[in-house]
Image (cartoon, rainbow, N blue to C red):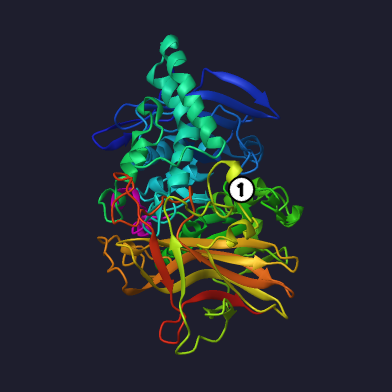
Amino acid sequence: MPEILTRGSGRLKAGRVRQWKDVLDRTRGVLIQKNVPAGMRDGTNLMSNVYRPAAGGEYPVLLTRLPYGKDLPSDGSVMDPVRAAEAGYIVVVQDVRGRYRSEGEFVPFVAEYEDGYDTVEWAANLPDSNGSVGMYGLSYFGKTQWHAAVMRPPSLKSMVPGLTWGNHLNGVQMRGGVQELGLMQYWAQTALTLDLLFRKYAGDRERIGEELPDLIHTIDTLLAGGGYDVLPLTGLPNPDELVPFVERGFGRSVHHEDWEYLNIEGKYENVDAPTFHIGGWYDCFIGETLRQYEAMKERSREAGLRPPRLLVGPWTHGDFGSTFGELDFGIGSSGMFLDYRGDLTAAHLRWFDATLKGDEGALEDTPPVKVFVMGENRWRGYEEWPPPGSREKAWHLRADGSLRREPGAARDEPARYDYDPEDPVPTLGGSVLMAAIHGSGPRDQRPIEGRPDVLVYTSPTLEGPLTVLGSVCVTLFAASSALDTDFVARLVDVYPDGRAICVADGILRASARESYPAPGVVSPVAPSPIEPGGVYEYVIDLWATGITFLPGHSMRVEITSSSHPRWERNLNTGESALQSSRTRVASQTIFHDAGRPSRITLTVVEG
């Protein structure tokens, strides 16, 4: 076997690998080497596939680390390793610890700090490497970049985190203090369990045969839209206890100390590599993508780094096409074309050419911020985000069901509805990461708007275009008869034909209101109970969007208390859904008067 880098006494024992024995394929002048081992500081070997120019020479290294199987078919539209190798890069695709060919035990995210550092430095010492490493990848692959970066590996010189996050409390484990039931259960069961089962009973085909039908049934149930209705949540299906970390995560509250370890929030000051951020308006992590861009913009100013770049399309999680939900945005919106100026692989390579090869001309014709504006369905370029000249405008929820610039009168009556956890509002589209049957992306909300537990506020028909580019939040003055409850707010684009297409939404748990005091802010403080009947101010973060509401359309705000199974149901009893099945109906009151001006605040730009 070839020599590998190992760690001893806390320092890497440097030494270049001289040769590789397993050469499996040559493609278009590219050498592909399978299952190349990298030694971690504790002696665990992580396996990688390495793509390199067959001609030899010295090249930068591009690294991605994933838990979904480096040898399995994957979507090359994000960054094609063969094309990157053809362009003069060595590309490393690695199974993270405890997944597929790599040794060790898999516990999501826990080992990615040290393993990320060690892998970066190992990759920098590969044969033909010039010592500079860039990282790329979306979602979990993006999070592994941040874990490595905050450890400050000296060879990490550039990053492209896509559709990813830094704070598990803002759209990953929970949102607004509410557990992300749909995302966590779907991700764990459909993306992780098969390999976990095969590893657990490796060599015991009979036992695998016994356990596999139960696991497949669980996955099939989730894909068909079921598997979430059980209470308490300890009864969620978990065949052979393969993903115990899901239940453990549901048991951690906003202020649990474990989040401080897993979160990158508060650690961006340790990142020394410039960043290029990729997001999607209907991605389940768009709020965090924009938060990371903002953090690195500040970090670049402080440390004299290259300013970050940002690219946001109309995309959902992991889908870079042009058709989502019930809308098509034109093929120029897709990751295959990107305004007819090359695909996502080309965008990656331009960035890496500039940051790893010193080719500043690679970025000359590309604006630092490029966002797709839905509605008008075109790309816009800016020098930074939020767009220069943007400003906030408030539209008020009115007692007559309208949405207007002017606040309500002093005696405007409140609106009321009852929320029953036994009959929650179903999830219908939006920025969700669940089975396709739930319909992620822009979906018509009329099937749920007719429910008595959904309040609807609609603006007059717009006479001119209204462009929203940036953060969106809803401020509610509300009361509940419950000891604890949730409030959901949704921004909707109403078409002339009546379609009500969701644009952005958010949720806030009443007892977590002080943990989420403002958009983009998470303060992990202990829950603060509410007094039944008391009026409280709730600031619900809808993250952000990029859309032009066209003339003839209207804006709409929906208010309700559930979106199941995307988010766990609040039982309205003050008890945890992880431990209790007892529910009660909550009577909810939304105020509109001048002293309690419930409203939506939009970031708008002119032109």
Kind of residue indicated by mark 1 = Gly
Based on the picture, tell me whether residue 271 belongs to the magenta stretch: yes
Q: Quadrant of residue 327?
A: bottom right
| 126 or 109: nearer the viewer | 109
Foreground residue among 592 and 176: 592
> Residue 120: where, in percent of width, then height?
43, 40
Q: Is residue 248 visible?
A: yes
- From the viewer's perspective, tell me whether residue 330 is left or right of residue 445: right
Residue 116 falls in image quadrant: top left
- Residue under pointer 1: 439
Residue at image x 53%, y 63%? Answer: 452
Residue 478: x %, y % from top left: 40, 72
Residue drawn at x 27%, y 56% is 255
- Circle 1 residues within 10 Å: few <14, some 14–19, many ≥20: some
Q: What is the span of residues highlighted in magenta in the rendered image?
A: 260-272
Q: Quadrant of the C terminus?
A: bottom right
Q: Circle 1 sits in a helix, a strand or a loop, which is it?
A: loop
Res. 384 visible in picture: no
Q: Position of residue 118 (x, y in %)?
A: 37, 37
- Provide residue 290's location: percent of width, then percent of height: 50, 61
- Identify whether 449 is placed above or below 135: below
- Above or below for 121 versus 571: above
Q: Quadrant of the N terminus?
A: top left
Image side of residue 440 versus residue 35, left or right? right
Instruction: Name the one closer to the observer, 197 or 131.
Output: 197
Please determine whether, in this image, residue 538 is positioned above or below residue 219. Answer: below
